[in-house]
Amino acid sequence: MANALWDARAISYQGCAAQVFFFLFFIAAEFSVLTLMAYDRYAAICKPLHYGSLVGSRACGQMAAAAWGSGFLNAVLHTANTFSLPVCQGNELDQFFCELPQILKLSCSESFLREVGLIVVSVCLAFGCFVFLVLSYVQIIRAVLKMPSSHGRHKAFSTCLPHLAVVSLFVSTGMFAYLKPPSISSPSLDLVVAVLYSVIPAALNPLIYSMRNKELKDALRKLFGYISSSLIMGAKS
């Protein structure tokens, strides 16, 4: 954001390391929290009578600590390992922020395989979280479809939809960024994809989670109504 405001493209070595650390920390922590939110929905819909014991204040504190702790450990390992590698391919990154794959391209040491190994471990852990998410929602959908009341089904689905929307956006953009075939990779495409998975989900999170808020819905209706009436009046004039 600072570079965009001051039309600068330079970042210090320490600033790049800090950017990598915080980026990895928040990415891992957010995915962990999204996984725990799926468990929360599962407990609320599939085990409503046991919800208080399964997701009590103590359990929530422990799960939150685990999510942030795993994010911190992930960020420390990747940052320390990446910035211990010697750099001999220049100091220019084909990206708008310090991204691990772009930094590894500048390394001339065979020890970069350690970082690749860490990335594989992180991907395996993320895949485990993804499987847990899918299994949780399979159980939730089964429980919702068995509900006799249509109002109950609607309420359950409306509770889950914002979370599902964030998970889908987060996972799909991240998977496309890191699993796309090398044959279609290019600097411009890498730039667009990086914006998709690093900026768009974070920007849309507050909006998605607020869509169940009645005041926000009323404000959006008034805004769209005002815009529509202004366009109609402008067309008539």
Image (cartoon, rainbow, N blue to C red):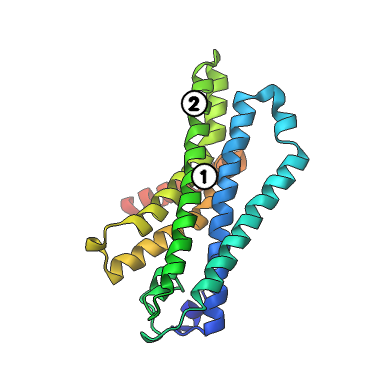
Disc 1 and disc 2: Cα gap in Å? 18 Å
Q: Residue at x 59, y 55 (%)?
A: 29
Instruction: Identify which residue, 129 or 159, lies in the foreground.
Output: 129
Q: Which residue is drawn at 53% across and 33% down?
A: 136
Determine whether 147 is above or below 164 in the image. above
The label shown at residue 141 is 2
Asked if residue 203 lies left or right of residue 103, the reply is right
Q: Where is residue 156 in the image (x, y as percent from the top left)?
A: 56, 27
Determine whether 92 is above or below 30 in the image. below
Q: Which residue is drawn at 48% across and 80% down?
A: 3
The earlier-in-sequence mark between 1 and 2 is 1
Going by the numbered disc 1, the residue's amino acid type is: Cys
The quarter of the displayed image where residue 217 is located = top right
Label 1: element kind: helix
Which residue matches tag 1?
129
Label 2: element kind: helix
